[in-house]
Image: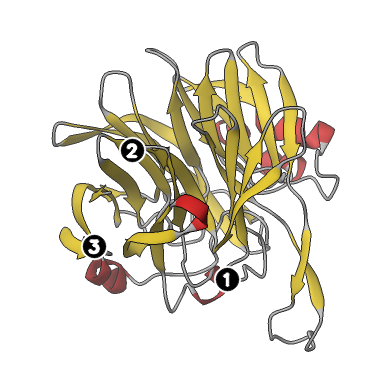
Amino acid sequence: MRTTRILLTVAAALAVALVPATAAAGGAQQTTVASGLNEPRGLAFSPDGALYVAESGSGGTAPCIRGPEGDTVCFGTSGSVTKIDRGHQTRVLTGLPSLAAPGGAQAIGPSDISFQGKGNMYVTLGLGGDPGAIRPGLPATGQKMGWLLRDGRPATDVAGYEAKADPDKIEINSNPNSVLALPGGQAVADAGGNSLLWVSDEGKISTLAVFPLRMVDAPPMPGTAPGMKVPMQAVPTSVVRGPDGAFYVGELTGFPFPKGAARVYRVVPGHAPQVYAQGFTNIIDIGFHDGKLYVLEIAQNGLLTADQDPSGALIRVGEHGSRQIVSQNLILPGGLTFRGGDAYVSNCGACPAGLGSVVRIRS
């Protein structure tokens, strides 16, 4: 279990009950700016000031195949990108591939978005497994899962690079989750491949960093015993550039998703990744604002119990590693960005279709 796909079902009534339109949350005012979204994930402001959010969709009806976690997932073209501008929201990119459990929850599809000047909108399409095993069973549109799109068109086969290079040397598994567009290329966090990649504007891919596997305590379950250790993969879900120019990468962590085990790494190309901050739980995104690191946890008490407690958290990291919770009034959030003095979070990023939203949080 190493992708960002969440194996749980959140009841619609619970989701609605926990996401009021406006609420005081962890001391911050929180307001809904977009709603009715289909599993919203990464989001970013464009050069013209509009906010765009990647929606992973709700899968479809056929074909249905064996998914990355061994269950059944069904394909559709329900993935999209929504533009939010001056109180209006419009899907500006539709028909993108999406795989989801029957019923449409827990989708893999468009996962992040980033801009580099006008006319350069980059979107990652997730996959969640071995492209050689998953993509042959999908129709033509599905063959682009695991790709990086530029302005809606396939640009680079990130999953194909994992199949050839396998940077972490564990197994072939690709799930391009986060993209950061910069002059000259794009940094991509491959959650399945446990790697940070660089995609040049010419489409050449290279490995910037590989994130380590760690041994952790096994959870109490059949087949385990007290003191037993199990391997836990990093599952990097986010990449941003820090005030110092280095890359910073947040990790979800793989099974068993232990509370407090997630880290933020600092990556300087040509050097091994270094731990910058730690003690978090299941990081789904990170960002810097006014020089401070913000960490978004998809499940603040851990993914293994997220079916009972799907609350996420936005945390501000201060000097010497001090923490302040900005908001806990979130459900399985999927992405984070900033504008002015506000944080914008895609909320209900792994809920059933239509329950997703974007909220503005006074940070």
Binning the other alpha carbons within 10 Å of mark 1 as few (below 14), some (14 to 19) or many (20 upward) gives some
> In the rendered image, which residue does mark 1 sit on?
259
Crowd rating for badge 2 (residues with CA inside 10 Å; few <14, some 14–19, many 20+):
some
Residue type, label 3: Gly
- Tell me residue 203's x, y (percent): 66, 16
Looking at the rendered structure, the secondary structure element under dot 2 is strand
- Is residue 100 visible in the rendered image? The answer is no
In front: label 3 or label 2: 3
Residue 166 relative to residue 128: left or right? right
For residue 268, which quarter of the picture?
A: top right
Q: Residue furthest right?
A: 169
Report which residue position mark 3 lands on. 27
Q: Residue at x 84, y 50 (%)?
A: 170
- Label 3 or label 1, whichever comes before in sequence order: 3
The vertical placement of 322 against 197, above or below, is: below
Residue 68 spot, x, y in % from top left: 66, 55
- Identify the residue shown where x is 41% and y is 70%: 310
Mark closer to the chain start, 1 or 2: 1
Residue type at the position of mark 2: Phe
User: Residue at the front extreme?
Assistant: 320
Is the C-beta separation of discs 1 and 2 under 8 Å?
no
Please, what secondary structure does the residue beneath circle 1 have? Answer: loop
Which residue is painted at 14% across and 31% down in the image?
86
* Residue named by callout 2: 338
Q: Is residue 334 left or right of residue 3?
A: left
| Left or right: 283, with 330 as reference point | right
**Residue 190 appears in the picture as rendered:** yes
Q: Nearer the viewer, mark 3 or mark 1?
A: 3
